Image (cartoon, helix red, strand yellow):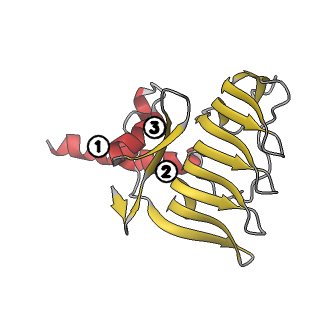
Amino acid sequence: MEHEKKPYILFSHNQDGEIAQTRITREQLGQIFFNEKNREWDNIHLALPEPVWDKIYEDSCLIYEGFTIDQKAFGAGKAFYRDGTPMAEGIFGIKGLLYGREYYPSGIIRFEGSFRLNQAYGPNYPIYGSWFDEKGKLLFHGKFEFFRSSLGYPLIDEPKGFNLFKESVLKGHIFMWVDARKYMAQYQEDNKESEKAK
């Protein structure tokens, strides 16, 4: 599906674990974001409005360019540090990046791979991919193991030394569960009304 000739992009892994780009449908987009086996949320992608291509500025600095819902990153896009250096790119969903890349402030790639959609406290966290040091040297490639702190915040157990990316210029511009619940509530209400009409 395209919007003004800008396709939705899915960063998926091929058999070698490398990221490949493909066009995807709205139905597939929903499955990527909400494949959590939670019946209440199975059809949330049907409740969400069509993402639109937009640019988000803060203090006249471009901090995001890509698909959005309610001026929040959702779909294929790219986030930037305030100096214009790329910060992250790929597929954004609830709580941030789901597939793609993170960059150090120097512009060197930090991580490339897949993230888990976190339904609990804290951000999305890597589940598979490659971690690089600030000189671009590969430090780890494979499955990331995590555990939750006493507060439920996800922490990376393997590889040792990898910390979740805490710096984000997108604070306030990330689509969150509360944003999705707003649309889900309306979707459920509309379904009740259509059932009554039958």
The residue lying toward the viewer, choosing from 184 and 48, is 48
**Mark 2 highlights which residue?**
182
Determine whether, in the image, residue 88 is placed left or right of residue 94: right
Q: Which residue, as the protein is rendered here, is positioned at the far bottom?
A: 60
Residue at the (43%, 34%) spot, across then down = 41
Q: Secondary structure at mark 2?
A: helix
Label 1: few (<14), some (14–19) or many (≥20) C-alpha neighbours in 10 Å: few
**Three-letter amino acid code at the position of disc 3:** Ile
Where residue 158 sits in the image (x, y, percent)?
76, 21
Determine whether, in the image, residue 197 is placed left or right of residue 143: left
Label 3: few (<14), some (14–19) or many (≥20) C-alpha neighbours in 10 Å: some
Task: Tell me: residue 145, above or below residue 175.
Answer: above
**Mark 1 highlights which residue?**
191
Residue at the (45%, 24%) spot, across then down = 37
Q: Secondary structure at mark 1?
A: helix
**Three-letter amino acid code at the position of disc 1:** Asn
Res. 32 mark: 3
**Three-letter amino acid code at the position of disc 2:** Lys
Q: Is residue 166 visible?
A: yes
Where residue 7 sits in the image (x, y, percent)?
40, 58
First reached walking from the N terminus: tag 3 or tag 2: 3
